[in-house]
Image: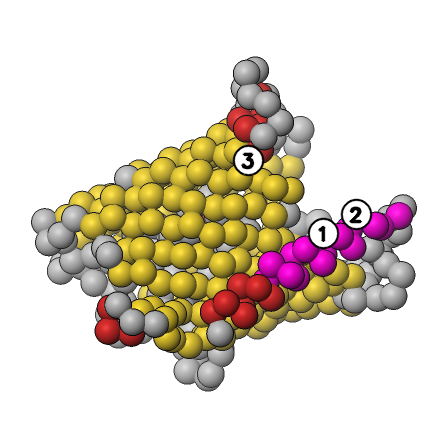
Amino acid sequence: MKIILLAASLLFCTAQLSAQDAESEPSHAGHVPVLSGGLGYVYNVNGGTSTLSPIIDPVLLLALGSHVLVESRADFVGVFQRRNGNGDYTGQVFSYVDYAQIDWLANTHAMVVAGKYITPFGIYAERLVPIWISTFQSNPLTYSVGTRTSGAGVGGQLRGVVAQTNKYSVQYSAYFSAFSSVYQLDAARTTGFDASVYFPVHRFEVGTSYQRFLQQRHINSEAAYVSWQPPHIPLDVKAEYDHSYYGHGYWIQAAYTLSQVPVANSFFKRMELGGRMEQVFPLNGGGNGLPRIDTQRPGVALNYYIRDDLRLVSSYQRQFSSAKDVNIWNIGFTYRWQWPLWPGRE
């Protein structure tokens, strides 16, 4: 089954690449439905336990005129591990709806969102989770802060741009989520906001998030983050600090593409080097997705872009804690696609 999934994924990528090479002049799609998303196949070794994970993440975009957009993303993730530690691989495929929402662009300063949406907390959940985007194929140790219990909210959201000039822009989002135990629409009762300032000349952003968890123990969670992509250097730096009742910690990562290295040939110019450092310090016993003891995890990544939409990924991380030190390896590939669901459109 695993071999079939891998072969089908590779065949899918090959067919799409051939089709794209044969395309002629692009046409304007206009307001037509689009099926986008990505797929990947990752081999993971965590503390000696190996896991095979084929992943497909389809994204549906349905524009209803120029002011309304229906969008949804689903996950189909396979988790296969060796039977009894050394036998054949066995497991199952899990399916999950990440979000299913309706966006109404009221004006240039406000967009109303209703449905199931990704919780706008910090920089990672909304922007870096998709397999075709992330430099590392593992989430930061503090990822659960602000994303309990499912990483999504069910309710309403208001977001937009407060002000925008040539020197800066200020964005915001505010939301309320009701408790839901409905299958594929599970969410916790929360409220909160996110805001950031972006400086386009320097391509630098600084932001903050706040959330109030309104179930069981009512707790506050806060985050502060930065993002920087120097205008003349192929470097991407992101960092975030998270704090909650159960602990606090940070992560910082950088990715550098070798496209500007003078001695690099065309092969090495497609390489991306990444590094990440993260630490967590539990409070009140930790838990709720956070480690229960002080933990730190440095790591490096090496990714290779065969094309802009097809890459090979690999990473190594070493996790240190008083309980046990473990090695974490990842290797695989990711592919990004988008199809207009309308004849003759691209």
Disc 2/disc 1 C-alpha distance (Å): 6 Å
Residue denoted by label 1: 17
Disc 3/disc 1 C-alpha distance (Å): 35 Å
- Residue 198: give its label: 3
Amino acid type, label 3: Tyr
Give neighbour class at mark 1: few <14, some 14-19, many 20+ (Cα, 10 Å).
some
Give neighbour class at mark 3: few <14, some 14-19, many 20+ (Cα, 10 Å).
many
Question: In the rendered image, is residue 293 in sight?
Answer: yes
Question: Is residue 331 rendered magenta in the image?
Answer: no
Which tag, 3 or 1, sits closer to the chain's start? 1
- Residue drawn at 47 percent across, 52 percent down: 332
- Residue 344: give its label: none
Amino acid type, label 1: Leu
Q: Helix, strand or loop at disc 3?
A: strand
- Residue 21: give its label: 2
At which x and y percent is residue 164? 64, 37
Which of pointers 3 and 2 indicates the residue nearer the eye?
Answer: 2
Between 258 and 263, the residue placed more toward the observer is: 263
Q: Helix, strand or loop at disc 2?
A: helix
Q: Is residue 270 left or right of residue 93?
A: right
Judged from this view, the residue extending furthest toward the front is 87
At which x and y percent is residue 27? 89, 51
Between 330 and 161, the residue placed more toward the observer is: 330
Judged from this view, the residue extending furthest toward the bottom is 182
- Residue drawn at 26 percent across, 68 percent down: 86
Task: Evaluate if marks 2 and 1 touch, with contact meaning CB atoms under 8 Å apart.
Answer: yes
Q: Main secondary structure of the magenta part?
A: helix
Question: In the rendered image, is residue 209 in sight?
Answer: no
Which tag, 3 or 2, sits closer to the chain's start? 2
Q: Helix, strand or loop at disc 1?
A: helix
| Residue 211 to residue 196: above or below | below
- Residue drawn at 23 percent across, 55 percent down: 47
